[in-house]
Image (tube, helix red, strand yellow):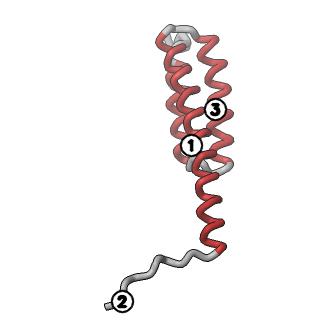
Amino acid sequence: MPAKSAPKKSKSAIKRTRQTETRTLRNKSVKNTIKTLSKKIEKEVADKNAEAAEAALKMTISAIDKAAKHRILHRSTASRMVSRLTRRVNSLRPSAAA
């Protein structure tokens, strides 16, 4: 039985691997930025700082929407994240019903 030779890699396969590595790093960076901004909102909500929380929310929504536009996040995932963060920030406002 002959020994198996190493798998051959075409130029295009090598290039695709290189592109994937680059994109993976970029996507990780964007996702980490979104996580950091979300944590900043959580901190401001915990400190009951409404103005800072709203400012952080604006930046976070922008970053999430950009990630969804570039398909780093699925649009439904992005929408869900924005909704949850907005709900938390709105919980700091006095309710109109009261």
Q: Identify the secondary structure beneath mark 1.
A: helix
Relative to residue 51, is residue 36 depicted above or below?
below
Question: Callout 2, which amino acid?
Answer: Pro
For the point 36% across and 89% down, which residue is it? 2
Quadrant in which residue 8 is drawn:
bottom right
Q: Earlier in the sequence, mark 1 or mark 3?
A: 1
Question: Residue 39, image x and y in percent?
Answer: 51, 23
Quadrant in which residue 12 is drawn:
bottom right
For the point 39% across and 82% down, which residue is it? 4
Q: Earlier in the sequence, mark 2 or mark 1?
A: 2
Distance in Å between CA atoms under marks 3 and 2: 58 Å
Q: Which residue is mark 1?
A: 28
Question: Residue 96, image x and y in percent?
Answer: 55, 13
Which quadrant, please, contains the N terminus? bottom left
Which mark is in front, 3 or 2?
2
Distance in Å between CA atoms under marks 2 and 1: 43 Å
